[in-house]
Image (tube, grey):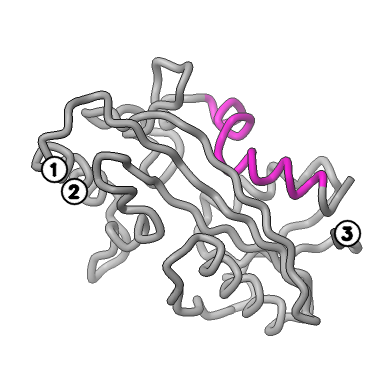
Amino acid sequence: MRKLTGDTLLVATHNAGKLAEIADLLAPYGITVVGAAERNLPEPEETEATFVGNARIKAHAAAQATGLPAMSDDSGIEIDALDGAPGVYTADWAETGSGRDFVMAMTKAHDRLIASGAPAPWTARFCCTLVVAWPDGHDEVFPGSIEGQVTWPMRGARGHGYDPIFQPVGYEISFAEMDPAEKNRISHRADAFAQLVKGCLD
């Protein structure tokens, strides 16, 4: 397993919420996070059908463009009654002509669950695959997940994405009702990140 050296890591995302979460996770290790938007990097087309495939595309593109080690995250929600959808298309369900609308995306997920006739609880999980890529083409892969269920109606104003409809196992509140520090401690991203720390930072 290759270790990360240096104090700067490029994070290949244009999502401000995701960037802030990753910066918080990396802060104790003395690593400064630089986002793709700061470097005016384009968003590469995500053409793979898996989280790891899309994460690799983004991490390698950023590492090649900047000469820095780059970390990418591909994540999404898998809903069992929808055969794992939206999965890798989690963000695509929110796309509109004028940006992403996650209220629309969450409503779509709920409408499909109702149409499916599947009884509650609607089990689901958030998945996250982190890839760290180096300019020489090497990469390391770290998958993480957290189990839970889809709840309705949407609850909470914290978090981002589908957080208002995801209730993790062992909790009576949604991710969007949770203190951000608690969410960052238990999330799918935290799971993947713990593996990254063990592999690349410790």
Q: Amino acid at mark 2?
A: Lys
Q: Callout 2: 10 Å neighbours few (<14), some, many (20+)?
A: some
Left or right relative to 138: residue 105: left
Judge whether 197 appears above or below 4 on screen.
Answer: above
Q: Which mark is residue 5?
A: none
- Residue at numbered disc 3: 3
Q: Are marks 2 and 1 in contact (CB under 8 Å)?
A: yes
Left or right relative to 202: residue 10: left
Q: Amino acid at mark 3?
A: Lys
**Which percent across, then down, holds residue 85?**
30, 51
Q: Are marks 1 and 3 in contact (CB under 8 Å)?
A: no
Q: Callout 1: 10 Å neighbours few (<14), some, many (20+)?
A: few
The quadrant in which residue 88 appears is bottom left
CA–CA distance in space, label 2 to label 3: 41 Å
Q: Earlier in the sequence, mark 2 or mark 3?
A: 3
- Rendered residue at 10%/35% (across/down): 117
- Rendered residue at 31%/65% (across/down): 99
- Residue at numbered disc 1: 111
In this view of the protein, which residue sits in the foreground, 192 or 32? 192
Q: How many marks?
A: 3
Bounds of the magenta segment: 179-198
Q: Earlier in the sequence, mark 1 or mark 3?
A: 3
Q: Callout 3: 10 Å neighbours few (<14), some, many (20+)?
A: few
Would residue 201 be counted in the magenta stretch?
no
Left or right relative to 185: residue 202: right
- Residue at numbered disc 2: 108
**Which percent across, then down, holds residue 196?**
75, 49
Judge whether 27 appears above or below 153 on screen.
Answer: below
Main secondary structure type of the part rendered in magenta: helix
Secondary structure type for disc 3: loop
